[in-house]
């Protein structure tokens, strides 16, 4: 911690430290069942952080699950066909996902706004169709079995603890990246774009460049999450990541609160993902029904999301500290004026 | 050349997409948001038609009208209680709310209707032969209703006073309201029309294909692709884009199966690169 503070001028607040220590201790007392709820939630929280980063540049992505899918398929294909070892294959899968996002972003982020939402939505469908139809590579609707890592002395089929720590590591890495992003010059540029793209354009910000940077980085990390998730699942098929999951990412982030780049999405994913997994076992259709209602209620009565609860309960004093909260309105007000 | 039946199928798919896309364009140009739950309204139209036509045994045309009216009423409710308070808050809140609605409607239908595919029985038996081509009467009926709906929509937008108000508000909302166009009531009318159009499209397609809770997703994506292709906020663009996508889906599907999605995506990317305002769009959103 001291080294981090010295090198990166990072200050790790006490509550976060407590959360971290707690997160590391979870496998000591949690059952395997609890872990099967937590590992997906951790993967989703990385995807949610990515979505939030994109939304903070004023763009709404409707296809983040597609980048999880690309990451997952690429990871699996690297592992199966080239025998890339566990860990490295996730890294390569995420990179592929980032490259694809770069290519899509360069074309569509020229226009941004509604065009971006529409094209990412269609992109999600496109990825699903390709996964379904390129049978030689993806085995079509039957999907692929993801090879399990060979870690000596640990049977990853029986215990999920290694995956839990991998997921925690990924979340921490992603959170650090997004956090530093947010505090850096880049983050300030993103904030200025989201509060007024016109003014930032006039002060010399090349909008498209920054949007593409955000989209690419977010999608790369989302790809890592997809790779990890499919390793944990042991299977990847066209139905694992599709339109529904894209909207789930969006709902989890919004419920958590997009006012903060890291805490909101993680909180949203950690709260909603286990609830969703529970609801699917109760009744088919209960999960989308209840999630739809939850997000509408949050939009109406708690527009800042769950993270804004703290300020509701104990309002922070005026002045001091950098402005942290972009409310929903500002985040996207001039999407339309684009 | 694919057989004529494929072209007819393309026309059916295309015209339902045109009807859906027109509803989207109307809502977009007046309220400034994409109605992300449009595909679910389409699905609700088909589900209501199924209940009325199959369960209650009502005449098909009456059932179609009933389903349309019901979904239009739902559209009004959505507009009044969900979208209108959120639209002034920018682009994100109403979009997320509409996506939540998408989830809620789909979930509700899965719970009450079930996930299995349900067949709507044939509306009209028999075929008509034109030379060597035989066309089922049912598909012909669907084509006739679709053309009728499109003509009625054209009349509504271009020949009635409400249509004039809609065109004016789409061009310049502030000025239109200065001239006495009540923007609130216009929101309601547009949303009711949009939802009704989605329901008609769903009700038309129900006897041709199947009814299931997820049937709205793919046509919705195709309809928004159509309006991007034709130009956001242009009804002529919706017509052209919907027909183009309809023929890509069927004629392309005839040759290469579901790979046609790749063609649609490539076409839209090309349009965005070369002509971002779309085939018929102008820089400003206009109906």
Image (cartoon, helix red, strand yellow):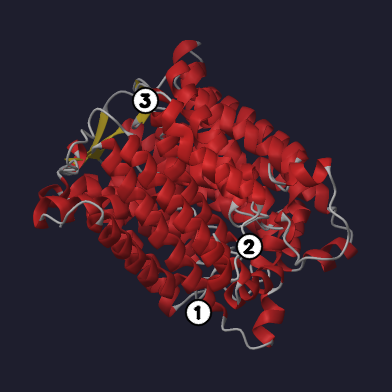
Tell me what residue is drawn at x 62 percent, y 44 percent. Answer: A256
Mark 1 nearby-residue class (10 Å; few <14, some 14–19, many ≥20): some
Q: Position of residue B111 (x, y in %)?
A: 49, 19
Count of all numbered marks drawn on residues in the image: 3
Q: Nearer the viewer, mark 1 or mark 2?
A: 2
Depth check: give the residue in front, B201 or A213: A213
Q: Position of residue B173 (x, y in %)?
A: 78, 64
Mark 3 nearby-residue class (10 Å; few <14, some 14–19, many ≥20): some
Q: The numbered mark 2 sits on a residue in which chain? A: A
Q: Is residue A216 above or below residue A16?
A: below
Tell me what residue is drawn at x 57 percent, y 48 percent. Answer: A265
User: Which one is earlier in the sequence, the residue at label 1 or at label 2?
Assistant: 2
Q: Which mark is residue B259?
A: none
Q: Position of residue A252 (x, y in %)?
A: 56, 42
Residue underneath mark 1: A209
Mark 2 nearby-residue class (10 Å; few <14, some 14–19, many ≥20): few
Depth check: give the residue in front, B184 or A105: A105
Q: Quadrant of residue B82?
A: top right
Residue underneath mark 3: A32
Q: CA distance from mark 3 to mark 1?
A: 44 Å
**Both marks 2 and 3 on one chain:** yes
């Amino acid at each position: 911690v001291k080294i981090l503070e010295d090198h990166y001028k990072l200050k790790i607040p006490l509550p976060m430290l407590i959360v971290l220590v707690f997160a590391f201790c979870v496998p000591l007392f949690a059952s395997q069942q609890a872990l099967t709820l937590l590992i997906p939630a951790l993967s989703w929280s990385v995807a949610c952080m990515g979505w939030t980063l994109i939304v903070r540049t004023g763009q709404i992505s409707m296809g983040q699950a597609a980048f999880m899918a690309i990451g997952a398929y690429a990871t699996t294909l690297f592992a199966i066909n080239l025998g890339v070892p566990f860990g490295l294959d996730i890294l390569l899968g995420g990179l592929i996902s980032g490259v694809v996002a770069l290519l899509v972003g360069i074309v569509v982020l020229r226009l941004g706004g509604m065009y971006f939402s529409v094209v990412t939505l269609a992109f999600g469908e496109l990825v699903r169709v390709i996964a379904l139809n390129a049978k030689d590579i993806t085995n079509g609707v039957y999907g692929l079995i993801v090879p399990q890592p060979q870690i000596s002395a640990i049977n990853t089929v029986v215990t999920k603890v290694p995956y839990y720590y991998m997921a925690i590591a990924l979340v921490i890495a992603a959170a650090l990246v997004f956090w530093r992003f947010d505090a850096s010059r880049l983050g300030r540029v993103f904030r200025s774009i989201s509060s007024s793209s016109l003014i930032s354009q006039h002060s010399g910000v090349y909008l498209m460049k920054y949007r593409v940077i955000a989209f690419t980085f977010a999608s790369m990390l989302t790809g890592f999450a997809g790779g990890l998730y499919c390793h944990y699942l042991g299977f990847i098929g066209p139905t694992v990541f599709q339109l529904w999951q894209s909207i789930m990412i969006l709902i989890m982030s919004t419920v958590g609160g997009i006012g903060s780049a890291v805490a909101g999405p993680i909180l949203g994913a950690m709260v909603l993902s286990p609830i969703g997994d529970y609801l699917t076992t109760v009744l088919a259709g209960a999960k989308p029904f209840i999630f739809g209602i939850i997000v509408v209620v949050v939009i109406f009565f708690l527009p800042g999301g769950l993270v804004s609860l703290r300020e509701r309960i104990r309002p922070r004093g005026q002045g001091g500290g950098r402005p942290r909260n972009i409310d929903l309105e500002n985040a996207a007000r001039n999407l339309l004026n684009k | 050349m694919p057989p004529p039946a494929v072209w007819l199928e393309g026309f059916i798919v295309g015209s339902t997409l045109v009807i859906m896309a027109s509803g989207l364009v109307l809502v977009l140009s007046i309220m400034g948001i994409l109605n992300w739950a449009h595909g679910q309204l389409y699905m609700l139209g088909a589900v209501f038609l199924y209940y009325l036509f199959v369960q209650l045994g009502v005449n098909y045309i009456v059932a179609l009208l009933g389903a349309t009216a019901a979904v239009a009423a739902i559209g009004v409710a959505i507009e009044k209680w969900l979208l209108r308070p959120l639209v002034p808050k920018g682009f994100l809140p109403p979009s997320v709310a509409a996506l939540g609605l998408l989830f809620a409607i789909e979930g509700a239908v899965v719970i009450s209707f079930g996930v299995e595919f349900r067949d709507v029985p044939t509306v009209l038996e028999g075929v008509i032969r034109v030379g060597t081509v035989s066309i089922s009467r049912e598909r012909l009926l669907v084509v006739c209703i679709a053309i009728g709906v499109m003509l009625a929509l054209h009349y509504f937008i271009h020949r009635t006073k409400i249509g004039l108000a809609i065109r004016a508000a789409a061009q310049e909302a502030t000025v239109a309201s200065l001239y006495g166009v009540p923007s609130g009531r216009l929101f309601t009318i547009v949303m009711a029309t949009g939802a009704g159009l989605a329901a008609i499209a769903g009700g038309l397609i129900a006897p041709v294909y199947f009814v299931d809770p997820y049937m709205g997703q793919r046509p919705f994506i195709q309809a928004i692709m159509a309006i991007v292709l034709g130009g956001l906020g242009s009804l002529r663009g919706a017509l052209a884009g919907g027909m183009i996508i309809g023929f890509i889906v069927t004629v392309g599907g005839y040759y290469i199966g579901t790979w046609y999605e790749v063609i649609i995506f490539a076409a839209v990317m090309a349009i965005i690169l070369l002509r971002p305002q779309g085939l018929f769009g102008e820089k400003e959103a206009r109906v």
